[in-house]
Amino acid sequence: MSPLDSPTMTPETAMTPGVTVITDDHGHHDSPTPIGFWIYLMSDCIIFGALFATYAVLGGGFAGGPGPKDLFEPGFVAIETALLLFSSITFGLAMLQADKGKLGGTTRWLIATGLFGAGFIGMELYEFRHLIHIGAGPDRSAFLSSFFALVGTHGLHVTGGLIWLITLVVQINMHGLNGPNMRRLGTLSMFWHFLDLIWIGVFSFVYLVRLV
């Protein structure tokens, strides 16, 4: 078997000019996450850091209006949080199936992830609609302005992640679990888990602390 027929390559071979990097039977390879994604993720950290800081400063400005204990229901928020956490688990299971080259299992777990994520967004939209309906919109007080900005920005990111997820499900079913699709799955997985971590911060800082 020639070096080009081997399913693995040494670092020296990979850096040799004119040698094409090949993959294993499933098309998997250890391509690094694109640097642009890391830059984007760092910019997101800055954005959410600024939003958390804004909420920390303005969160006590009720302007004579309702506060967290008047508006938030712990049970509702707990279910909302559970949906997003379950979506993180199912995404992890999808990645395990993808690493084994199982397209069907990967697709099923990704669809489950999408359903949990859609449920989370549905509950968030219901909460926003309810708050606006009772006169607790973002223009009511500094507290509500910072709340809608922080939670709404996170919700927009989850919505973007769902669109990305749907697109990727279509791609892997059209082209299989090849190298580029595995890299995209890994990148989306990091993004999705990042959003889960941000939500844990939102849940703890915005809901839990204010309700205790």
Image: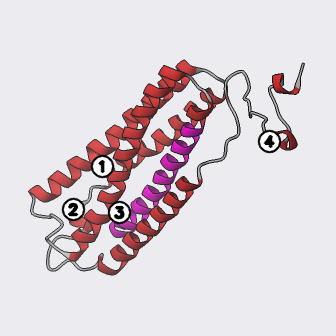
Instruction: Check disc 1 and report its element: helix, strand or loop.
Output: helix
The region drawn magenta spans 183-212
Which amino acid is tagged 1? Phe
Can you give x and y, in whole percent of width and height, for residue 118 in the image?
A: 33, 38
Q: Earlier in the sequence, mark 2 or mark 3?
A: 2
Q: Is residue 174 left or right of residue 19?
A: left
Q: Earlier in the sequence, mark 4 or mark 3?
A: 4
Q: Which residue is mark 4?
A: 17
Marks 4, 1: nearer the viewer: 4
Q: Earlier in the sequence, mark 1 or mark 3?
A: 1
Can you give x and y, in whole percent of width and height, for residue 164 in the image?
A: 41, 39
Instruction: Check disc 3 and report its element: helix, strand or loop.
Output: helix
Residue 31 seen by the camera: yes
Labelled disc at residue 130: none
Q: Separation of disc 2 and disc 1 at Cα?
A: 11 Å
Q: Earlier in the sequence, mark 2 or mark 1?
A: 2
Q: Which residue is mark 1?
A: 76
Q: Residues within 10 Å of mark 1 (few under 14, many from 20)?
A: few
Q: Separation of disc 4 and disc 1 at Cα?
A: 58 Å
- Name the magenta segment's main secondary structure: helix
Q: Earlier in the sequence, mark 4 or mark 2?
A: 4
Q: Is residue 210 magenta?
A: yes
